[in-house]
Structure formats: structure tokens, C-alpha cells
């Protein structure tokens, strides 16, 4: 776990430049969410729009959106695939996005279709700290 300016960033996850994370599960499926920065930077999240099961996306597509009082933004798909489960629990408990971004606030589970190639385009391991530090500096 890397902590940068108070934000925890688990190094075993893969990240998009838009702060979506993905975890590769033991069965080869993916669990996706938004990182600690993404869940708090825009202020209190007031609304989330998530896809339906069986929706298919390409890496880089928006699979949903978040809305706060001062920001509306897309949730970016880190890897191509089909949605196999949606965490409808967070729609009623939006505070989980800030309180438990890597646990109970997961958003969707995906059956990937091009995993190896897609993961190679994401920030992972040692690259997380360098990317996130530069990203925070650019936003301040």
C-alpha cells in the first residue's frame, strides 16, 4: 500500500488516469471501483450511474458516471469485457466511495475479453506512486 498525501493506493491494483481501479480476482474476473482520490476530490458524491449486467464495454469507454455538487464525470473502463455483477448497494450508500473505496464500494465485476493487453496500459506496482504524485501536482 502506498500512501501519497493522505490517499491510500494499493499497489496490487491497476489504475486508469481517471482514477478507476481494477483488481484481477483468482477466477480471472475483474472487480472495478474508483480510488480514494476519485471518491473524495470532487466533494461529497450525490449520485452514481452504473451499467446493467451483460452490458459490454471496451477499455477506455465510460461505463457510468459520478456526480457531486461541483463535478460530473465518467467512470472509465480499465479493460474490455462484459459486466457480470453490479454493486447496487453503493447507490444507497454513496459515502462508501470515500469510506471504503477498495472494499465495499466496488462498483462492477467484469468478465474480461482482452485482459493481458488492457492491463499493460494501466498504472500498476511501482508506477502507481510516480503517476499519482504527478497527477496530484498537476491538479494543485
Image (cartoon, helix red, strand yellow):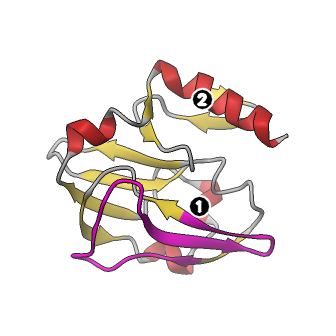
Magenta residues (range): 48-74
Mark linked to residue 97: 1
> Under tag 2, what secondary structure?
helix
Query: For this rendering, which residue is in front, 16 or 53?
Result: 16
Q: Quadrant of residue 51?
A: bottom left
Q: Is residue 136 above or below residue 74?
A: above
Residue at horizontal 27%, vertical 75%?
55
Which is closer to the viewer, label 1 or label 2? 2
Q: Quadrant of residue 110?
A: bottom left
Q: Please state the horizontal and vertical placement of residue 41, each as a whole percent of the image.
A: 74, 54
> Under tag 1, what secondary structure?
helix
Q: Is residue 118 above or below residue 4?
A: below
**Residue on which the image places disc 2:** 131
Q: Is residue 101 left or right of residue 71?
A: left
Q: Is residue 14 visible?
A: yes
Q: Quadrant of residue 139?
A: top right
Residue at horizontal 30%, vertical 42%?
118
Do residues under tags 1 and 2 come within 8 Å of each other at their CB atoms? no
Residue at horizontal 79%, vertical 75%?
69
Residue at horizontal 44%, vertical 23%?
125
Q: Please identify the quadrant where the C terminus is shown.
A: top right
Q: Please state the horizontal and vertical placement of residue 112, each as a whole percent of the image.
A: 20, 53
Furthest residue in direction left, as rendered? 27
Q: CA distance from mark 1 to mark 2?
A: 21 Å
Q: Please state the horizontal and vertical placement of residue 8, each as a whole percent of the image.
A: 61, 36
Q: Earlier in the sequence, mark 1 or mark 2?
A: 1
Amino acid at each position: 500500500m502506498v500512501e501519497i498525501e493522505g490517499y491510500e493506493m494499493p499497489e496490487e491494483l491497476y489504475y486508469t488516469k481517471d482514477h478507476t481501479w481494477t483488481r484481477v480476482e483468482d477466477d480471472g474476473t475483474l472487480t472495478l471501483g474508483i480510488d480514494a482520490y476519485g471518491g473524495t476530490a470532487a466533494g461529497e458524491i450525490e449520485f452514481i450511474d452504473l451499467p446493467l449486467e451483460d452490458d459490454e464495454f471496451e477499455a477506455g469507454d465510460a461505463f457510468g458516471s459520478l456526480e457531486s455538487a461541483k463535478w460530473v464525470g465518467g467512470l472509465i473502463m480499465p479493460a474490455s469485457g462484459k459486466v457480470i455483477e453490479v454493486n447496487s448497494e453503493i447507490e444507497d450508500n454513496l459515502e462508501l466511495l470515500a469510506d471504503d473505496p477498495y472494499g465495499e464500494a466496488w462498483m462492477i465485476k467484469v468478465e474480461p475479453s482482452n485482459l493481458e493487453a488492457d492491463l499493460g496500459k494501466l498504472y500498476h506496482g511501482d508506477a502507481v506512486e510516480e503517476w499519482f504524485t504527478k497527477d496530484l501536482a498537476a491538479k494543485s
